[in-house]
């Protein structure tokens, strides 16, 4: 939801965030989405993500390129939604470290099955909900260009200054999440 997050950012960073978001859901000035229920759902999800960060994160977001902003939103999704984090670290990174870089939705389905054995909420999900979760996750990877048109994983190439934000914030795990090679991670951490 890069476009939506960027459109709502002035409201989200204001002190009257909740009031302004309620007004936006009714008036539709920024989102430009016809359905009020869709605006409400999108607003709720974006607020959930915004609450996971602080002002320096959003300052960095605003000065970043679109490609970098999308990576920052991937970071937020991984920290906000445990299922996305599990998909990424239990499936995507394992696939990345294997001999084949091809992504197969079947492995994400298996991860949901594994999670469902100890999570009552996930266990009750309908098959459609499970497929939608996988679809959204894979679309996120495509939007940040971590997954190409042939469904092959590929590393992200962004300038070092971007990665320094995560190094200085002690969020080194995100360098792994971005599929950076060991030598590149070591070089970035030495800067």
Image: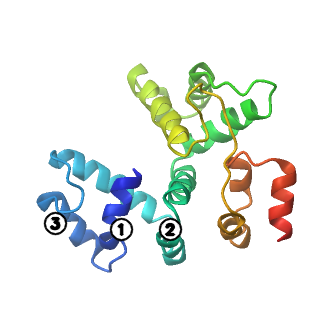
- Dot 1 surroundings within 10 Å: few (below 14), some, or many (20 or more)? some
Are dots 1 and 2 in contact, CB under 8 Å?
yes
Residue 54 in sight from this viewpoint: yes
Percent coordinates x, y for residue 183 in the rendering: 87, 52
Residue sitting nearer the eye, 55 or 121:
55
Of badges 3 and 2, nearer the viewer stands: 2
Q: Which residue is mark 3?
A: 23
Where's residue 57, x and y in %? 53, 71
The quadrant holding residue 191 is bottom right
List the residue tagged with mark 1.
9
Residue 124 seen in the figure = no
* Marks 3 and 1, the one that precedes in the sequence: 1
Task: Tell me whether the residue at label 3 lies in contact with that at label 2, contact meaning CB atoms closer than 8 angstroms.
Answer: no
Mark 3 vs 2, N-terminal side: 3
Residue at horizontal 68%, vertical 41%? 89
Q: Residues within 10 Å of mark 3 (few under 14, many from 20)?
A: few
Q: Nearer the viewer, mark 3 or mark 1?
A: 1
């Amino acid at each position: 939801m890069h476009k939506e997050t960027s459109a709502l950012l002035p409201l989200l960073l204001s002190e009257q965030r909740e009031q302004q978001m309620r007004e936006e859901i009714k008036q539709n000035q920024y989102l430009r989405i016809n359905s009020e229920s869709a605006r409400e759902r999108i607003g709720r999800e974006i607020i959930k993500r915004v609450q996971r960060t602080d002002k320096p994160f959003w300052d960095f977001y605003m000065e970043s390129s679109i490609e970098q902003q999308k990576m920052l939103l991937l970071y937020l999704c991984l920290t906000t939604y445990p299922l996305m984090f599990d998909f990424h670290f239990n499936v995507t990174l394992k696939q990345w470290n294997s001999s084949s870089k091809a992504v197969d939705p079947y492995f994400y389905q298996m991860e949901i099955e594994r999670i469902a054995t100890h999570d009552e909420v996930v266990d009750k999900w309908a098959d459609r909900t499970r497929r939608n979760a996988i679809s959204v996750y894979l679309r996120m990877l495509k939007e940040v260009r971590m997954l190409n048109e042939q469904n092959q994983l590929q590393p992200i190439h962004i300038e070092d200054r971007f990665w320094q934000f995560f190094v200085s914030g002690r969020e080194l795990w995100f360098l792994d999440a971005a599929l950076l090679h060991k030598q590149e991670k070591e070089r970035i951490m030495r800067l």
